[in-house]
Amino acid sequence: MLQATLSLSSEIDTYMRESGIPNSRWYVGVTSDIEERLFGYHNVVRNGGKWAHGRCLSSAEARDLEAAYHRAGCQGAGGGGDHGCVYIYAYVVTPTTTE
């Protein structure tokens, strides 16, 4: 994994840990369109919700990072999207989000 992805992973890890919310309540996925996926499809609250995202250097790196979060107990399903999915996102599952 390249340095940029390690830095992104560290930032997301820190955010999730500091929230005090267990990994089992976080959903992690990849996308090519953060706005549509996170705030549209998943219905995450933009202001006041717990979420994070960032750009990986490639789709392969985004998918590798996504898989690592799933192995760490986060919700989500790998394998979706296309080669343009270079963004990774994480959000806390709530009664108003769509998984």
Image (spheres, helix red, strand yellow):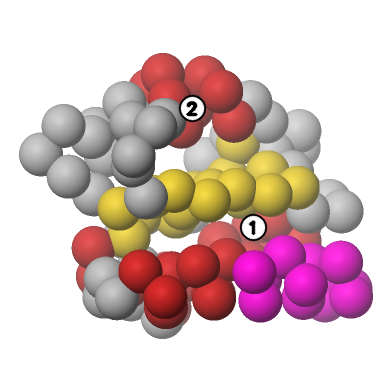
Q: Nearer the viewer, residue 43 or 77?
A: 43
Q: Is residue 9 magenta?
A: yes
Q: Which residue position is annotated with label 1? A: 63
User: With respect to residue 42, does 8 lie above or below?
Assistant: below
Q: Quadrant of the C terminus?
A: top left
Query: Where in the figure is residue 42, as x and y percent of width and height?
Result: 34, 30
Mark 1 vs mark 2: give the one in front.
2
Magenta-colored segment: predominant secondary structure: helix
User: With respect to residue 40, does 52 lie above or below?
Assistant: below
Q: Amino acid at mark 2?
A: Arg
Query: Where in the figure is residue 36, as x and y percent of width and height?
Result: 52, 19
Q: Quadrant of the N terminus?
A: bottom right
Q: Which residue appears at 24% of the width and 32% of the height?
A: 98
Region of the chain picked out in magenta, as a range = 1-11
Judged from the image, the secondary structure of the residue bearing numbered disc 2 is helix
Q: Amino acid at mark 1?
A: Arg
